[in-house]
């Protein structure tokens, strides 16, 4: 039987150290990616903006996990915000992948 007494909150105790390490790696990746994008003059623009949105959403989600206490994480507002960041970050990466494939196909065929 499923225990729904804690729904919709987290069913586990998030590790603040692991969330901090992952946030650091994503933040470092974001900084390196911004430098690389500046060097390439943000080309292609749409993919650059989508990747920036994804990195920022994932970074903010892991920062919230690392900083907030367990009791604060079990509030509806924080749960909704973290779920939104998680969903947005992953879906924007998927959209970015499809956009990249479309641009590659257009470059190979010479048209839309």
Image (spheres, rainbow, N blue to C red):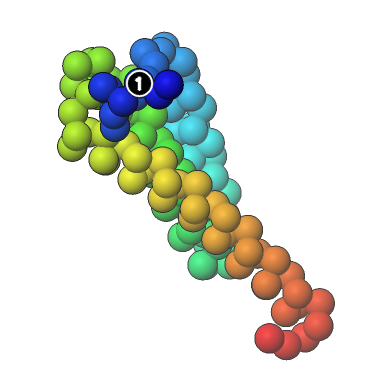
Is residue 103 toward the left or the right of residue 9 in the image? right
Asked whether residue 40 appears in the rendered view, the answer is no
Name the residue nearer the viewer: 90 or 40.
90
x 53%, y 36%: residue: 29
71 on left or right of 55: left
Q: Say if 53 sits above or below 26 in the image.
A: below
Q: Which residue is mark 1?
A: 3
Above or below, 41 against 64 in this view is below
Quadrant for residue 4, please give it: top left
Q: Quadrant of residue 108?
A: bottom right
Which structural element holds mark 1?
A: loop
The residue shown at (68%, 72%) is 102
Tell me: residue 79, above or below residue 3: below
How far from the left and from the top, in percent, is residue 110?
77, 86
78 with respect to 47 (left or right): left
Please state the horizontal and vertical placement of residue 2, each as a whole percent of the image. 40, 24
Farthest-out residue, bottom: 111
**Residue 68, position as x, y percentages in the image:** 24, 20
- Which of the pair 41/59 is nearer the observer? 59
Toward the viewer: 29 or 72?
72
Q: Quadrant of the C terminus?
A: bottom right
Depicted 14 relative to depicted 55: above or below: above
Q: Is residue 45 visible?
A: yes
Residue that extends furthest to the right in the rendered view of this protein? 108
Which residue is depicted at the point 55% across and 61% down?
95
**Residue 96 location, x and y as percent?**
57, 59
- Quadrant holding the N terminus: top left
**Foreground: 61 or 7?**
7
The residue located at (54%, 45%) in the rendering is 33
Q: Is residue 17 left or right of residue 105?
A: left
């Amino acid at each position: 039987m499923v225990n729904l007494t804690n729904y919709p909150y987290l069913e586990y105790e998030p590790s603040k150290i692991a969330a901090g390490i992952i946030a650091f790696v994503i933040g470092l990746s974001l900084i390196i990616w911004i430098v690389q994008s500046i060097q390439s003059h943000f080309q292609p623009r749409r993919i650059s903006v989508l990747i920036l949105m994804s990195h920022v959403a994932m970074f903010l989600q892991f920062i919230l996990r690392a900083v907030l206490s367990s009791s604060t994480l079990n509030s509806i507002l924080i749960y909704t915000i973290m779920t939104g960041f998680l969903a947005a970050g992953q879906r924007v990466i998927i959209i970015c992948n499809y956009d990249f494939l479309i641009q590659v196909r257009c470059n190979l065929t010479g048209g839309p």
